[in-house]
Amino acid sequence: MFPFQSITSFKRVPNQENGKCFACGQDHSTGLRMKFFTDETNVFSELVVPERFAGWSNLVHGGVTATILDETLAWTVIYLKQHFILTKSLHIEYLRPMFVEEKLYSIGKISNQISDREIQVEASVYNLQEDLCAKATGSVVMFSAEQMKKKRLFPEDFLKQFESSVFNL
């Protein structure tokens, strides 16, 4: 559990400038614009899912819930381990309905170091009443900047900018 009302009193996790990520990019005009905070053990976010991301009626679409969980576990490893990452697996349990236009909270924590490159992470989403609504366990693979360059998934200037703005260099 975490302090729902005081998430923003924690240290803000830095993000890239000009971020276009659907989940965390502050420049994505129609995205979730998630911001993350940390107590140096866990990574937290609070957000309100816009009505445009409803599934049935006023419920948050399950795919958006999956995105929130995936992004939370990703930023948990990106920040706490200071590595580039790619999600390897994600197992989700939907436990309670979540409603659009209502505040939600997510928390991520590292649960197990599987190998020198693979980390198991847990992420959870709670509603304002502090009910656990969804949870996930995922496996994330860490990459160095050099490994990411070799994969050619991102332009080099993006990797440099991300590294300089997010990692504590």
Image: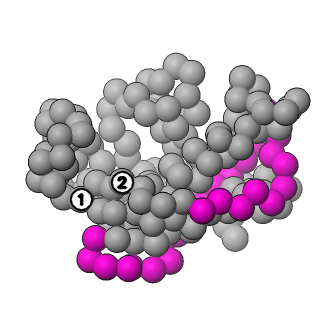
Given residues 94 and 68, the one toward you in this image is 94
> What colour scheme does the image use?
one colour
In the rendered structure, does residue 111 fall within the stretch colored magenta? yes
Q: Which residues are magenta?
A: 91-117
x and y percent of residue 138 in the render?
A: 51, 64
Say above or below: 10 vs 14.
Answer: below
Residue 8 versus residue 32 in the image, above or below: below
Q: Is residue 162 above or below residue 106?
A: above
Q: Horizontal placement of 136 versus 141: left or right? A: right
Secondary structure of the residue carrying numbered label 1: strand
Instruction: State the mark number for residue 86.
Output: 2
Give the residue pinned by disc 1: 143
Residue 14 drawn above or below residue 17: below
Q: Is residue 160 visible?
A: yes
Q: Is residue 93 left or right of residue 162?
A: right
Residue at the top extreme? Answer: 29
Residue under the image location 45 percent in, 66 percent down: 139
143 vs 132, nearest the viewer: 143
x then y, percent, for residue 166: 30, 48
Q: Quadrant of the N terminus?
A: bottom right
Q: Give the position of the C terminus as an image quadrant.
A: bottom left
Asked if disc 1 and disc 2 are in contact, CB closer than 8 Å, the reply is yes
Q: Left or right? Give the position of 21 relative to 2.
A: left
The picture places residue 56, in percent across and down from the top left corner, at 85, 33
